[in-house]
Image (tube, rainbow, N blue to C red):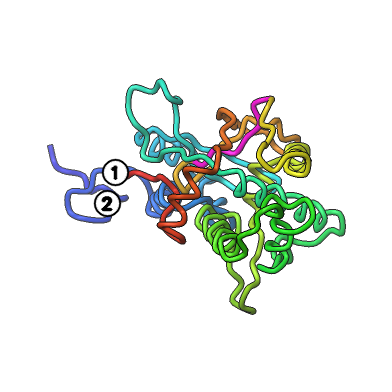
Amino acid sequence: MSDIANPNALFEGDTSDMPAAARMAAIALKRDRYITGDLFEVVEDNRDDVIRSLNNDMLELVVNTRYHVMYATPAGGADAPIRSLKTRASLTREEAALLAFLRIRVLDYENVHAQPAEWVVSFEEIRAALTTGAGYLAARNDEEGVARKVVAVVSVATTHGYLDPSGDEEGMFRITPLVPVVLDRALAETWLAANADDADAVDTDGADAADVDGADAVDTDSADAVDAAGYAGEPDVSDDAEHDAKNDEETGSDADGTTR
């Protein structure tokens, strides 16, 4: 029997039957926080191949058609017999407060029909939201410590894919479509209200919370009316004492908990 060349081979000995574009999309889903744009369309055109590749690494595909976002999340939960390529890490309370603030800001932009490219926020606006009025850090007296914490929280939000630094102006960020995908309006308002009522408590009752799958995906059990496409996760907004100590030592460090 004569050998038949593999039309999808990209290197000697390559036995994969996935087209190159589908492989690129699958790799992006495994490596990056989320995908959108052209890669979203590539996955749509090669969905079976991409899902099979993700499943091989104990990952599931999550799709949000309204915001044109896809991400990969660990499959099987805590009882899975094999550890997924990605792992979950919890948001601290101040990180949850920032995420809620960003979600409400997105809602404001959507109310005036602004496009995602126009969803911008400044570092000073974030600092003010967290440190003044009912902000989560408003009661703290250590100004230097608060400043370090705000920088660290913004860094984590960037790592997790919620903020994209703007190249046009220093201190400006674009809020990514991932924010409304992982957090619905009602939950954002609940978190903000909880912060206003009690700076030491965030109400996560009702299986609505942000669980970070490595730095590459976020799961919520939030019944997001936008597009509840298979979110799964337990409420987990962690107490900040232990995390604060770690962040003070590792400000700007890898806060994603990803293992590969």
Labels 2 and 1 touching (C-beta < 8 A): yes
Q: How many numbered circles does the render carry?
A: 2
Residue closest to the eye, 173 or 177:
173
**Mark 2 vs mark 1, CA separation in Å:** 7 Å
The three-letter code of the residue at mark 1 reads Ser
Give the main secondary structure, helix, strand or loop, of the magenta stretch: loop
Task: Answer with left or right where residue 95 lies relative to residue 29.
Answer: right
Residue at point 73%, 43% (across, down): 195
> Which residue position is annotated with label 1?
16
- Vertical placement of 67 versus 167: above or below? above
Residue closest to the eye, 241 or 184:
241
> Which residue position is annotated with label 2?
9
The residue stretch that appears in magenta:
206-212
Residue at point 81%, 54% (across, down): 110
> Mark 2 Cα within 10 Å, few/some/many (few <14, many 20+)?
some
Residue at point 86%, 54% (across, down): 111
Residue 239 at x, y percent in the picture: 55, 38
Residue 105 part of the magenta-drawn span: no
Badge 2 or badge 1: first in the primary sequence: 2
Residue 79 at x, y percent in the picture: 40, 20
